[in-house]
Image (tube, rainbow, N blue to C red):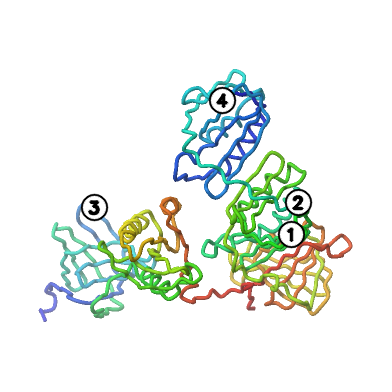
């Protein structure tokens, strides 16, 4: 513990620190800024970044210092300095709360979580694409990558399905490549293409239709059995 | 190709054909209208592989032939022309259009690349054009717009002998209209699911022409999966939707009711519209019926509120029921009658709205079923 009054450098390796304090803030650097004294939330993150929040807006702080930066704490004054020498000076008048918590390892934002879930649900409900449709397998491997679903229609013909959350041109192109390859396989050919998405862009629909690919708009909530709390006729 | 034609006849024909052209044509020729002159008649055609439309116009023809030009451009030009005869001639790769002192030169596309329009299926019978148009507009309003349920985006036509039933539902409301027609085969029994938008556009175009509309529908032969409509000089074909598993929606109409109310349509529409101003998009308007009449309310305790009382002739136990205001207004406005008869089972079962005359007698032929919104208070 350094003696009181001496500035100490704090590097938080993990976790966040939340401080609620009455403070004023001065930014000294390319752009000068001043926040008059008020009660605010100070957030110190594991990467060393410091941000000052008011009680509004979801993510945008009043002022902040991006990492890499260094926090020097002295009684009543925090100095956050970055490599360029810019300085965020927080003058604390009164500290109401000071709380640290380790968050642990973050799995990251899974953006295509819905897409994977859609694929899983559609694999369970191949009849979404037509009566008598059955699943052959998910992630059917082709030489250029896996096609999301391979199905058989009621007559036993192969159907390749590309599942997307938002159906755009890229998805149609992707499916076109798979179809071209799959149609060379005498065991599979002829392979029909189905482009399934929660929402299909008009451009993607035109391209798909032009290439003989059927577009199917799927209802994610209905597939996962999430019923809206509303009455319907049937 | 060279001909002279009346400006209004040409503008009407081109405007109607151009309306059904695809907004994003996958092949450039599909953005065109085909002008073809044979035997002193001009045929204007448009096609997008789903819907085709064709109009025949009488012209003074100097030379037969065909030309394919941008439909949208030709429609805009013909609409803006002065009221004088129009001379059109194909010159090389261009179309020359002269009207009074206005002169246009339009590039043409190769006629050989244009797809052949589908044949009209064989005629199944005829309907009075005005009756057909009003029936379609009464029913198509209830069709769904949600593409995840393609079947709901269509109007189901049930052809049985001399009666046609038109049905459409989006699962929140259901409209049914029965009309008489003259079938070719008196024993006919056929069902077809027609895209609601196409049917509505067609009926709107054919209704004002008057006379009879020919309904063409193939059964188990060439042209299956296709429906055609012809009226006056216009004909249109459309691909049908797959309606093999259309739910048995007729059974949704309740067999009996516990309460009924007679209300003046125009007054109720006005009141609902006014009160609904404070209702959010998903909140209902509440209709409270009692012997004293009807009170229409909307809004919550925290937000803006509105209520209005009006006259209603009500029999049964007092009842409070919530509806989507737009769905209620849609139903009331399409009754085509001065009085609405509302029949209720209870606050959670679908209610039936039927048209009634001035003295309150029910006019048969049309019924609108509407699902209430659950109300907690």
Alpha-carbon distance for marks 3 and 1? 76 Å
Chain holding disc 1: B
Q: Label 2 belongs to which residue?
A: B127
Alpha-carbon distance for marks 2 and 1? 9 Å
Looking at the image, which is closer to me, A22 or B290? B290
Q: Is residue B342 left or right of residue A153?
A: right
Q: Specify which label sits upstream in the sequence, 2 or 4.
A: 4
- Residue A111: image quadrant is bottom left
Chain holding disc 2: B
Same subunit, labels 2 and 4: the answer reads yes
- Residue A59: image quadrant is bottom left
Q: Can residue B271 be seen in this view?
A: no
Q: Label 3 belongs to which residue?
A: A31
Looking at the image, which is closer to me, A180 or B33? A180
Circle 3: element type? loop
- Residue B242: image quadrant is bottom right
Q: Which of marks 2 and 4 is in front?
A: 4
Alpha-carbon distance for marks 1 and 4? 43 Å
Mark 2 touches mark 1? (CB < 8 Å): yes
Classify the position of the C terminus of chain B by image quarter: bottom right
Circle 1: element type? strand
Residue drawn 24% across the image and 54% down it: A32
Chain holding disc 3: A
């Amino acid at each position: 513990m350094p003696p009181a009054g001496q500035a100490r450098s704090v590097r938080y390796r993990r976790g966040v620190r939340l401080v609620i304090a009455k403070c004023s803030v001065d930014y000294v650097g390319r752009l000068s800024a001043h926040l008059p004294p008020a009660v605010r939330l100070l957030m110190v993150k594991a990467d060393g970044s410091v941000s000052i929040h008011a009680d509004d807006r979801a993510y945008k702080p009043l002022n902040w210092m991006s990492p890499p930066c260094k926090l020097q704490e002295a009684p009543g004054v925090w100095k956050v300095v970055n490599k360029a020498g810019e300085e965020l000076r927080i003058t604390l008048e009164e500290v109401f709360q000071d709380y640290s918590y380790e968050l642990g390892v973050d799995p990251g934002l899974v953006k295509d979580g819905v897409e994977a879930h859609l694929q899983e649900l559609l694999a369970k409900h191949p009849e979404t694409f037509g009566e008598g449709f059955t699943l052959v397998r998910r992630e059917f491997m082709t030489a250029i990558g896996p096609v999301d679903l391979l199905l058989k229609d009621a007559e036993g013909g192969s159907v390749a399905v590309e599942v997307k959350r938002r159906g755009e041109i890229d998805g149609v192109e992707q499916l076109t490549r798979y179809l071209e390859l799959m149609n060379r396989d005498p065991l599979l050919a002829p392979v029909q293409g189905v482009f399934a998405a929660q929402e299909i862009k008009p451009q993607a629909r035109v391209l798909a239709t032009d290439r003989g690919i059927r577009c199917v708009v799927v209802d994610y909530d209905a597939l996962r059995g999430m019923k809206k709390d509303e009455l319907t006729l049937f | 190709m060279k001909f002279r034609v009346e400006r209004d006849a040409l503008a009407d024909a081109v405007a109607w054909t151009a309306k059904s052209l695809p907004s994003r044509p996958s092949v450039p020729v599909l953005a065109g209208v085909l002008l073809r002159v044979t035997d002193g008649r001009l045929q204007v055609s448009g096609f997008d592989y789903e819907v085709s439309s064709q109009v025949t116009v009488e012209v003074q023809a100097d030379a037969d032939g065909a030309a394919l030009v941008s439909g949208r451009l030709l429609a805009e030009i013909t609409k803006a022309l002065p009221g004088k005869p129009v001379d059109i001639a194909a010159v090389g790769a261009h179309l020359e259009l002269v009207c009074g002192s206005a002169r246009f030169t339009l590039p043409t596309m190769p006629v050989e690349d244009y797809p052949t329009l589908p044949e009209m299926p064989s005629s199944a019978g005829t309907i009075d054009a005005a009756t057909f148009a009003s029936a379609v507009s009464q029913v198509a309003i209830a069709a769904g717009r949600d593409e995840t349920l393609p079947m709901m985006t269509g109007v189901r036509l049930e052809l049985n002998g001399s009666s046609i039933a038109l049905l459409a539902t989006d699962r929140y409301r259901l409209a049914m209209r029965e009309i008489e027609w003259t079938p070719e085969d008196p024993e006919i029994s056929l069902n077809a699911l027609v895209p609601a938008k196409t049917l509505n556009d067609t009926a709107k175009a054919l209704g004002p022409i008057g006379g009879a509309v020919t309904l063409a529908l193939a059964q188990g032969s060439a042209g299956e999966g296709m429906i055609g409509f012809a009226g006056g000089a216009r004909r249109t074909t459309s691909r049908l939707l797959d309606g093999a598993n259309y739910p048995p929606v007729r059974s949704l109409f309740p067999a009996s009711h516990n309460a009924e109310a007679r209300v003046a349509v125009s007054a109720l529409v006005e009141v609902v519209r006014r009160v609904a101003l404070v209702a959010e998009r998903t909140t209902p308007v509440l209709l409270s019926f009692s012997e004293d009449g009807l009170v229409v309310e909307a809004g919550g305790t925290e937000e803006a509120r509105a209520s209005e009382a009006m006259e209603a002739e009500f029999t049964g136990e007092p009842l409070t029921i919530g509806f989507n205001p737009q769905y209620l207004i849609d139903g009331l406005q399409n009754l085509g009658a001065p009085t609405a008869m509302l029949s209720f089972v209870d606050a959670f079962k679908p209610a039936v709205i039927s048209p009634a005359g001035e003295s309150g007698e029910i006019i048969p032929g049309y019924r609108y079923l509407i699902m209430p919104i659950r109300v907690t208070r």
